[in-house]
Image (cartoon, rainbow, N blue to C red):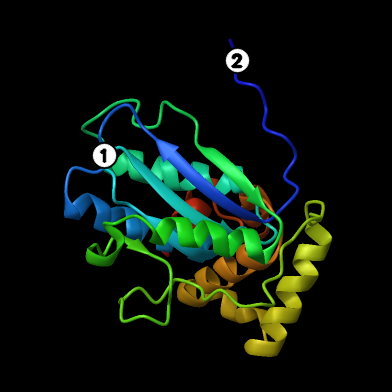
Amino acid sequence: MARQARNTQKSSLFSIKQQSDIAIFKDKKDRGVFIEILQQAKKKFGFDVYGYCLLDDDAFWIVINTKTRSVASIMQSISISYSLYRSDVENLFLRRYKSEAIYDLETLNNIMQTMMSDPRYETCEYCFYDIDTNQPFEFIAPIHQDIEIQKKYPKKTDTETMIRFIEDYVGVHYNTLSVLDDLEIRNDIIKHVYACLNITQTQLSQYFKISNSAISKILNHGI
């Protein structure tokens, strides 16, 4: 039977738990790689990470603000990247992740308190949520009173609007479109535009006249 589609996203803030029938993490190296993948996904999609917990071998828990991005796209990117790393096993994420939409700051704080309440929290570097502590994970966003929870999502940005955005951005920062011949600058612009606009990789591919796979490599690995 085909999986039933998820409900339309009505919040940008989520507590997400992924369970597996087999070990997701074998050791510290695996957990470290997952954190790196989470950081890469954050750069690619422009979402905020408020906390993560990798204490269990067969599960992970993250709390994120997707902003204008689809939670499904973010989770797909994370799952595919980690599955490619764990190529030694099949069907690592056979179970579907469970996402709980969060609509207010009180609920968010309650969820983070639950994460903290695990007795293993104090002694484990793989369960973390507060940027103000002495933990060395600077990509974690602090929880402020003015967190903006997105509840309405814009339609996909049309190509004409994307082109105007690119031209305006390049004009402000580089003065001339000729800089697009510089691959490093071009790649930085691609990542910036993808993080800011609700666009597809195909739109970027058509504008910059490079393949979809090249766009994907730039967004995922910066090359």
Front residue of this view, candidates 57 and 117: 117
Residue in the picture at 82% in, 64% down: 161
**In this picture, residue 131 sits left or right of residue 108:** left
Secondary structure at badge 2 equals: loop
Front residue of this view, candidates 100 and 181: 100
Dot label at residue 86 = 1
Q: Answer whether residue 129 is visible to the viewer in this image.
A: yes
x, y percent for residue 203: 69, 52
Disc 1 crowd, CA 10 A, few/some/many (<14, 14-19, 20+)? some
Distance from Cα at disc 2 to Cα at disc 1: 26 Å
Q: Answer whether residue 38 is visible to the viewer in this image.
A: no
The quadrant the C terminus occupies is bottom left
N-terminal-most mark, 2 or 1: 2
**Quadrant position of residue 65:** bottom right
The residue tagged 2 is 2
- Amino acid tagged 1: Arg
x, y percent for residue 134: 31, 81
Disc 2 crowd, CA 10 A, few/some/many (<14, 14-19, 20+)? few
